[in-house]
Structures are given as C-alpha cells and as structure tokens.
Amino acid sequence: MITFDGVTKRYADGTVAVDGLSLEVPTGEITVFVGPSGCGKTTSLRMVNRMVEPTGGRVLLDGVDVSAVDPPALRRGIGYVIQQAGLFPHRTVAENVATVPRLLGWDRRRARARALELLERVGLETALADRYPFQLSGGQQQRVGVARALAADPPVLLMDEPFSAVDPVVRASLQQELLRLQAELRKTILFVTHDIDEAITLGDRVAVFRTGGRLARLDAPERLLAEPADDFVRGFLGRDRGIRRLSFVPGDTARLRTDLTVPVTADVAAARAVLEGAGTGDGDRDRDAAGEWLVLVDPDGRPLGWVAPRALPDTGTLAEARPEPYGTFVRGRDPLRAVLDAALLSPSGGAVAVDGSGRVEGVVTRRALDAALARAAAGAGAGTAGGAGGAGRADASTGTAGVPGGVDAPGTVAAAGEAAGG
Ligand SMILES: Nc1ncnc2c1ncn2[C@@H]1O[C@H](COP(=O)(O)OP(=O)(O)OP(=O)(O)O)[C@@H](O)[C@H]1O
C-alpha cells in the first residue's frame, strides 16, 4: 500500500503543486489520479519513487517512509511507465525490457529469456525482440514500456499517462490489456491520466484532483459517477455522466424475453401465433407481444435480424422475410450500456441477447430496456449506483452477479428458440 500522509510539494519558485494530499493506494488495486493539466498528478506520482521530494508530509510504502530508503533500492521495487514509453533508443526491444534484471545482476541469457516471456505477456510477438524502438508503432512501444516496468516483477507500478500518445483504438486495446494483466498480476498501480474515460475504465478507485494540487474526490468510479459531490467534479466528469454510469449496471437487470425468437425455418403462421398467443394470459402488459418485433435465428441459433409484424410474409416460411440489422450484447457479461447501444443499433428499439458463442438467448424489448434504465436512474438517486449489482469495472468482462431482471418466457416461443438452438 502507498500512503500519502499530508503531502505537500512547493517548488523553488513558490508554485504549490500538491497541497496537503492524504490518501491511500491499496495493495493489488489500480488507483487513478485524474484532473486538469497542472493539478499536481505527476508531481504526486513522482514523490513515490523519490524523483521529487515532498516539502511537507510523508509518503509511505507499506508503512515505511520512502525518504528513509535509498532511491536506487526503492526504485527496484517500483516499475515506472511514462508517456511515449521512454525507451532507450539505442537499445533493442529485448535489451530495453531486460534493463532492470541486468542491473540486478542477472546474466545475459536469463535476462533475455525474461524479456521474451514479458513481451508475450504484454501481447507482442517475440520476433520484435531485436528491433529498435523506432522500428515499432506507438502502441507497440507502449507495450514494451509496460514489459520493461514489469521485468523485475516489482509489487508497485507507477504509470504516468502511459497511453496518451497513441490513437484511441490502440489506446482502448492497451487499456484492456492492462486490465487483463492486472487480473493475473495484482500489482499496486498508481496511474495518472487527464482522461476521465480512461480513469473510469481502469480505476478500482479514482482520485479527482483540482487545480492547486488538492484532492477533490476519491471513490470507486461508479460512485463517483452517481454522486459527483460538487460542481467541479461534476463538470470534470462531463455531460455523458449518465451514460457512463450504465457501464456499471449489469445488462442482466433488463428483463429478457425468450418468446420473441423464431427460427427461420418456421411457418409464418407459427410466427403470427407467437405474436398473438404471447399477448393473452395473465394481462401483464409487459408480456404483451402484440406489435413486438421478432428475431429470426438460423438453424444454429445465431441471429439473422429483426422482422416487424407488418413485414411478415403472407404465407410460407420465414425464409421469405427480410430481416433487418440488429445490435447484440452478451448476456451475463455486458453492462446495461451495451444493451442500450445494441438497442440503438436495432430498428425495433430492442437489443438481441446472445451467449458467449453468439447464439441468441432472447431479446430485451424497448419497454424492458426503458424499465431497466428507469431502475438504474432510481438507483443513482438513492446513491446506489453500481449497487444495481456492481457490474464491476467499466467495460471489463467481469461477470454480473447483480440483481437480474429475470427471464420472461410466457409461451410458445421459447420452444421455437430452443428448436433453433438445438
Ligand atoms: N520543476 C518544477 N518547478 C516549478 N514548478 C513545477 C515544476 N514541475 C511542475 N511544476 C508545476 O507544478 C504544477 C503541477 O505540475 P504537475 O506536472 O504535477 O501537474 P499534472 O497534473 O501532472 O499536469 P499535466 O496533466 O499537464 O501533466 C504545475 O503548475 C507545474 O507548472
């Protein structure tokens, strides 16, 4: 654990970069420092490995004041990754990664073996080992930077805007890669960024700094989004706060209907029966299938598209129908944000739920989605964002042990779906 205990940094010219910072960076978690330019994030991070010395307060590593530890010894236990990777340009990729092991006295062969192992770990081909940094893309260089920081297996990683110099697509993949690595390695990570989306994606906890080096808020990202605490934090979180929050609400909170899935081989008459039959019964409006779109599935149970009731062929089988494009989400994995996204991509306004192998499990209708969104919003008001089940990290493919919206299969259709799935 890293502890900031009333830490202040006043530079020689009088600039107060960090002002009375007290917080803990728990062991095995990712804590993100985020805030506007110049708010003291980098200065705070560098006080951990003594690249900057505080002018007040203490920084402790597992209870030991770092000012009492010799900097080289301190830094051996702390990996450090910076923007644009900071690789040594005249050393090969493998030599860059092996830097710390070599400093620790490992022989060349062992250090190289470790370097190759780490390259694979961060998703790079070992064929790149003998290239020089300028022969790599920006994203590859960042991966090498992460591999180098991990080389001596330090318990602590300091990451200062490590992904900010690469394009958004590469950046997103580096973020997911870091989460994957962290799930295995459980390092204590202090990560600095000025990008709130990155902070929310990566952080177990997010510390929002305000200008002048003061801590505005420290909390789990889902709680931060639900209750920003003040106007500064709210402003920093931006206008998409409500949408972002849905990344922390399990997709399973939306009720699933298994009765609206029909195999492409079925008769049109059977499809009409589905629409009519499912609407009768207990009078539950939510079960009313009349007017609902159907999802056609191939004999393997994979989605072919939506068909509106009015677009059903007059006779014959559904093979005559023209299915329209659809959006899917993976049930049990994706958050409500993905359900909303899938619905926005579908002409029906509903989302197609698939399993991990892409087979249809059912649909979330527009009405069911509306209800789930309303519940999520009510959860925010009650201060229980993420309490809707705590889907875990934004975007992460963690399971959703949350409160499920239930499965609703009132009739004939489940059988049709199963037939298709079989
Ligand atoms: N060596 C220095 N001497 C004087 N002032 C400094 C020094 N280093 C940083 N500062 C100032 O301290 C403040 C905090 O800087 P710091 O780099 O920690 O901010 P930051 O939040 O990491 O910013 P950014 O997101 O732009 O990197 C800024 O006002 C900066 O100008």
Image: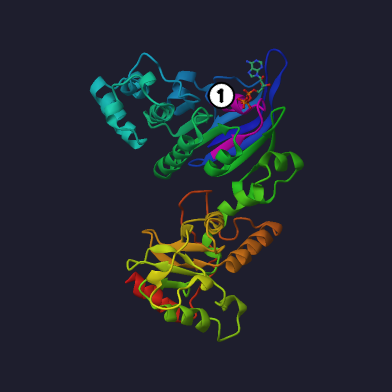
Task: Note whether residue 63 is visible.
Answer: no
Ligand 1, by image quadrant, is: top right
Q: Measuring from the top left, give residue 83's x and y in whole percent.
A: 50, 25
In the image, what residue type sits under mark 1? Arg
Q: Around disc 1, counting alpha carbons within 10 Å, would you say few (fewer than 14), some (14 to 19), or many (20 or more)? A: some
Residue found at the very far left of the displayed protein: 109
Identify which residue is drawn at 52% across, 57% down.
342
Say above or below: 333 vs 310. above
Residue 189 percent location from the top left of the image? 50, 36
Which corner quadrant holds the C terminus?
Answer: bottom left
The picture places residue 46, in percent across and down from the top left corner, at 56, 24
Q: Residue at x 71, y 58 (%)?
A: 381
Q: Is residue 213 left or right of residue 135?
A: right
The type of colouring in the image is rainbow
- Residue 284 pos. (x, y %): 60, 81
Q: Nearer the viewer, residue 317 or 201?
A: 317
**Considering depth in this image, is 120 or 204 the residue closer to the camera?**
120
Q: Which residue is mark 1?
A: 46
Residue 33: in magenta span: yes
Q: Secondary structure at mark 1?
A: helix
Which residue is most to the front? Answer: 314
User: Ligand 1: does it lie within 8 Å of the C-beta at label 1?
Assistant: yes
Q: Is residue 25 magenta?
A: no
Q: Nearer the viewer, residue 70 or 320?
A: 320
Q: What stretch of residues is rendered in magenta?
A: 31-48
The structure residue drawn at horizontal position 66% and vertical position 25%, both measured from the top left corner, is 38
Residue, far bottom: 281
Q: Is residue 249 visible?
A: yes
- Number of numbered tags placed on the structure image: 1
Vertically, is 103 above or below 270?
A: above
